[in-house]
Image (cartoon, helix red, strand yellow):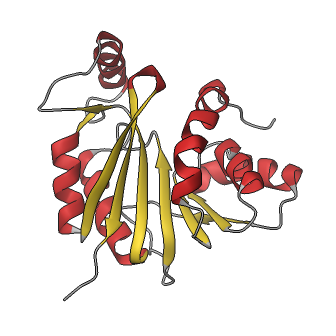
Amino acid sequence: MKPYSASCDENRDPIFSVIQPLLSDCSSVLEIGTGTGQHAVYFAEKLPHLSWYTSDCTEYHAGIKMWLQEARLDNTCGPFDLNVSTSTWPRRKFDAVFSANTAHIMHWPDVEAMFAGIGTVLAKHGRFLLYGPFNYAGKFTSDSNARFDEWLKSRDPDSGIRNFEDLDELAHHAGLALLNDYAMPANNRILYWEKQPTA
């Protein structure tokens, strides 16, 4: 049975309203943590000018393939096997990387590995767009986020909502600079970093 996430349907239009202009001049996007595949087919259909590369750990590939095969879009690719900590990252460069609801599920060493890997695959001036809930100065932005964090930690003590400042430091080490921080519905955000040219 094809996997389905209700939250993907709920957040896809708000996410699209933010990423559409940011991806208007891009030709390739790598999605990290494609999950069910719903975002991939929805965004790829609405952005036919770019190639949407899906990736995730192997156990999610069957579900992603169901969504891609049903959509039959010419501009979707993959899914590629990408465990951010153990897989070999693609050798090619991408104009953008997109990831939704991954940082709070990954363990912190995996988050570190994700940012380091993104720094290697982004082209000059490439964009990294990260969607999800984030803390600021170590504080939750809402009671619902605090409850969500408690639920995450009850399932996996090494997961949890990440601090924006910690993520931004990882981005800086990966050669990325924050250009915007977009408020989204349900106490989520989209963080937008851009790869800086090396001296």
Quadrant for residue 13, please give it.
top right
Q: Residue at x 60, y 50 (%)?
A: 59
Q: Please, is residue 59 above or below residue 4 in the view?
A: below
Question: Residue 74's spot in the image, x, y percent?
Answer: 83, 67
Q: Quadrant of residue 183?
A: top left
Q: Is residue 9 above or below residue 149?
A: below
Q: Nearer the viewer, residue 193 or 122?
A: 193
Residue in the foreground of this view, choosing between 111 and 51: 51
Q: Seen in the image, is 125 located left or right of residue 100?
A: left
Q: Is residue 191 left or right of residue 173?
A: right
Q: Position of residue 69 (x, y in %)?
A: 85, 55
Q: Residue 122: where, in percent of width, then height?
A: 42, 74
**Front residue (pair 37, 171):** 171
Query: Can residue 118 be seen?
Result: yes
Residue that sits furthest to the bottom in the current view: 199
Q: Is residue 57 visible?
A: no
Residue visible at 51% across and 83% down in the picture: 92
**Quadrant placement of the N terminus:** top right
User: Which residue is found at the position 74% from the left and 50% from the top?
Assistant: 41
Image position, residue 121 (x, y; %)? 42, 76
In the image, taking residue 42 as reference, residue 158 lies left or right, namely left
Say which quarter of the image contains residue 73: bottom right
Number of numbered discs on residues: 0
Q: Quadrant of the C terminus?
A: bottom left
Q: Is residue 24 above or below residue 148?
A: below
